[in-house]
Structure formats: structure tokens, C-alpha cells
Image: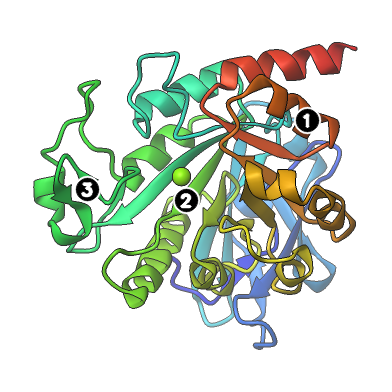
Amino acid sequence: MAQTNFTLTNFTYTANKPVVGKIVPVTTGAAMPKVKLVGESARTFELVKDNTLKLKKTAISNPQAFWQEVVVETNSGQRDTFRIVRDEFITNRVVAHRGAWKNTGATENSIGALQHAIRLGCAGSEFDVHMSSDSVLFVHHDHDVNGTHIEKTPAAELAKLKLPNGEYLPTLEAYLQAGLNQNKTKLILEIKPSAISKERGQALARKVVETVQKYKAQGWVDYISFDYDICRKVKELEPSAKVAYLNGEKAPAELAKDKMYGFDYHQNVVKKNPQCIEEAHALNLTVNVWTVNAPEMMDWLLERKVDFITTNEPEILLEKVSKLSSK
Ligand code: MG
């Protein structure tokens, strides 16, 4: 968990773009302590004007690792470590809904389904997160697993539950560890609203962000939620987080005002109001649409240049985008 109150504005680099981003206070307007880079990372990175973090040229020419760690120390001796991932994430717009499970035999929201989405070459793999009664995070769609309510059950009990494909119910920690082994497929993390209370949803959002920070996974994870207060909580705790709103009723202008990444709306909302795509793009927001399984609707959305399509049929959509890119 981060012990400090500063963070980065970006967690990726490319060989052509060695500037990573700035080291900034988490709270807007708070004073930024004087910082320096320490250890091995001082050889890999340098701090230039305004705490801008830059990868040194020599480090870029080293192609071995797809991520680098940077250790930042304040003048009072506080330290934090961030992981900077080389941005080779696929941009084919295909987001596998709950992983790639329908045509692979993996159970939805299993680590196996994530691995299939990675193997297929999807831009993103979506999954859902809930919190146990003792505040451990688990990946699952429904609030219950065969009648066992996740929010009312301690982690030790939940950890004994098996999915139909033989995997144990995955914790978020295990799921992230599997996802961080690569830098091609983004992890699209849905924070489920609590069925118990609004407050519990806020606690869940905090725990999720802390877990992503603990695993230094910021460069891999985008967030989505149906609960706008959860979206805002994530932005408060990690201002550079890419957060998209799911529930469909907010205009792009409001999302832009709150510095959201974009919207991720049901296909009927977008079909009824197609100009929202252009409105979002004019405001530099991304457009994601769920859950699109019909080939005709995929075509309709691809024509309108949406950024992501969330689907249970990633194989069909992958074929479509590969045809488009070879045209
Ligand atoms: Mg979901």
C-alpha cells in the first residue's frame, strides 16, 4: 500500500515517448514535497522540470523487461515505488466481457477466461469485483456464488468455493498477478455497487484502489462502475485513473467535467442517441459499449468509430477488426 501522498499522472512509456508523466500530490492543490529518485531507478529514470519523470535513453535501448520500477523518496525519507509499463497494449477495441469464456470453455470471470482473452489478443478483458464481509476482494459477477452472498461471507469461506472449471473463486490479488504477466491486454476492472449499503461501496472502491497500488498495477488497470460515487471515489484516490461510467444517463459534458475517461453504456442507450459518440469524442472522452454480441451491431458501432466494444463474442469481433485494418 502506498505510504505516501504523491502519485504519477501516467504509468506507461513508449520508446518514442520517454516522458512518463509528473509526480504530483494525490490531493489537488496540496504541497508537493521535494523528491528524488533512488537506487537502481536513478540509473533508469531522471527527474526533469516540475517533477517530470523521464526514462533515460540508455534504459529505452534495453528491451528485456516490459516494465521498470521507479523508487521515489521525499526529503523527509518517505519512499514509494511505482511500476512503469512499456505501452504495447493492443488498440483493436475488443473488450472480452468477463474474459473470453463463451467459446473457450473457461468459466466467466475466472483467471482461465482472462488468459484466453490475453491469448486471443483482446485490447481489454473485463471482470467484476466484490468485497467479502472481512474486506477481501473477489472476482465474480453476481453478488452470490451459488447462494453464498459474497458481502456477507468471510474470505476463508469464499476461498473454498470452486468455479465450474475447477478454479477456486479468484481473489482480486490472484487475478491481478495473472494479468500483470503481460503488457498487451488491459484489465478492465468493474467495481460492483454494494448490495448492503452505499458506504460499503465506497469502502470497496478504496480497497480496490489500494490493492491496485499495492500490486503497482496502475498502468494495466482501467476502471468501470454503475455507481457514479464509486467512479468519483476512484478518481479522488488515484487522479490519473481511467474511469468510465456504466449506467447510461449522464451526458458526456458531465463526465468530462469530472475528468472521467469516458462512458461505457448499454448498446440501446447508444443506438437511441448516436450523437453521444461524437459528443464524447469532441470532449476527448472514450466510448465503450456493452454487451454487443450481434455482428450487425458490431458493424454499426465500428462504423461510428467507438473506442471499445464489450462482447461475449470476442472471436467474431476480432475477425471484424482484423478485416477492417487490412482494408
Ligand atoms: Mg461487468
Tell me whether circle 2 and circle 1 mark residues in contact (CB < 8 Å).
no
Q: Which residue is mark 1?
A: 300
Q: How is the image coloured?
A: rainbow
Question: Is the residue 90 above or below the residue 225 in the image?
Answer: above
Question: Is the residue 300 above or below the residue 6 in the image?
Answer: above
Q: Which comes sooner in the sequence, label 2 or label 1?
A: 2
Q: Position of residue 221 (x, y in %)?
A: 55, 47
- Disc 2 and disc 1: Cα gap in Å? 25 Å
> Disc 2 beta carbon < 8 A from ligand 1?
yes
Question: Is the residue 212 above or below the residue 7 in the image?
Answer: above
Q: Position of residue 233 (x, y in %)?
A: 51, 72
Q: Which comes sooner in the sequence, label 3 or label 1?
A: 3
Instruction: Tell me: 251 left or right of 190.
Output: right
Q: In terms of secondary structure, where does tag 2 sit?
A: strand
Q: How many marks?
A: 3
Q: Which comes sooner in the sequence, label 2 or label 3?
A: 3
Q: Which mark is residue 144?
A: 3
The answer to whether residue 289 of the structure is visible from this angle is yes
> Residue at the spot x=50%, y=59% of the render?
226
Q: Which residue is mark 2?
A: 190
> Disc 1 beta carbon < 8 A from ligand 1?
no
The answer to whether residue 11 of the structure is visible from this angle is no
Q: Residues within 10 Å of mark 3 (few under 14, many from 20)?
A: some
Quarter assignment of residue 174 = top left
Inspect the image, locate mark 3, and give the three-letter code of the amino acid beneath it: Asp
- Disc 2 and disc 3: Cα gap in Å? 16 Å
Q: Which mark is residue 79?
A: none
> Residue at the spot x=50%, y=34% of the render?
97
Instruction: Tell me: 104 left or right of 88.
Output: left
Instruction: Tell me: 71 left or right of 259.
Output: left
Q: In terms of secondary structure, where does tag 3 sit?
A: strand
